[in-house]
Image: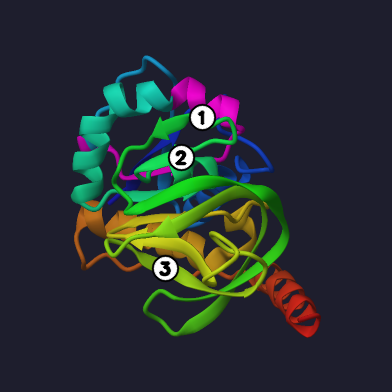
Amino acid sequence: MQLTLRLAHLYPDHMNVYGDRGNIIALRQRCQRRHIVLEVIPVNPGDTVDWQTTDLAFFGGGQDSGQALIASDLIERQGPGLRAAIAADLVVLAICGGYQLLGHYFLTHTGERLPGLGVLDVYTIAGKRRMIGNIVIEVDLGKGPWQLVGFENHSGRTFHGPGVQPLGRVLVGYGDNGQDRKGGAIYRNTFGCYLHGALLPKNPQLTDHLIELALRRRYGTQVELAPLPAERELTAQRVMVQRLLSRR
């Protein structure tokens, strides 16, 4: 049986900074090497999306101006279908600005309150200090703890409510707000965080986790993701993690 997944890439022209498009490349390559067809559908303002036949969504980061341009389209046009799909376990990865817009609201430096989709129980307030640098988060997605590595560059401070769980605990870096050591958030199959870099090429464990979730949602829990070597990626990941942890 030919396995096929459909991925909606939300606002690629407005929300694509710091190499975030590399996440799409990583997903496509690790699917392709397993002979899984990954169909990528760009979603631009004004587009219509059939969220019921969509398996994954990616929402990258952007400047405040980019977020403002697409916020109304996200909420008014895509909102009802996307909310329902997330409630039905659509697999979503949202980075930085995309992460913020899945929350309740983002209060910008100018005092403008950008409403979010409200599917993640988080809110974001622009801070005066920019939080920038390499970051390591300890995560456990059900197969034991490991260290997720990335690069953060944000002034928004994101705070969690009780309706989400942290993606992980910050070992190096600032994390969501520089205060509580929370790095990213998980709700059902939706993952949000501030890790650019791009995130997935550096962390094949997370890439495969997202693919496996999407396959099981589409084809049933009996589907097993075929093992795939990632020696170079994991070696680079270990070297970076060890280097950063040694500097704490």
Q: Nearer the viewer, residue 100 or 30?
A: 100
Give the magenta-colored segment's residue range.
52-70
The image shows residue 177 at horizontal and vertical percentages of 55, 60
Q: Mark on residue 193?
A: none
At label 2, the amino acid type is Phe
Dots 3, 2 in contact, CB < 8 A: no
SS assignment at label 3: strand
CB under 8 Å between callouts 2 and 1?
yes
Answer yes or no: is residue 71 visible.
yes
Q: Quadrant of residue 202?
A: bottom right
173 vs 83: above or below: below
* Res 173 → quadrant: bottom right
Give residue 205's position: percent from left, percent from top: 51, 69
The residue singled out by tag 1 in the image is 67
- Per the image, label 2 sits on a secondary structure element best described as strand
Q: Position of residue 220 (x, y in %)?
A: 19, 60
Residue displayed at 44% across by 52% down: 35
Q: Residue at x 29, y 46 (%)?
A: 119
Residue picked out by circle 3: 166
- 185 vs 84, left or right, is right
Q: CA distance from mark 1 to mark 3?
A: 23 Å
Residue 106 marker: 2
Circle nearer the viewer, 2 or 1: 2
Sequence-wise first label, 3 or 2 = 2
Farthest top residue in view:
46
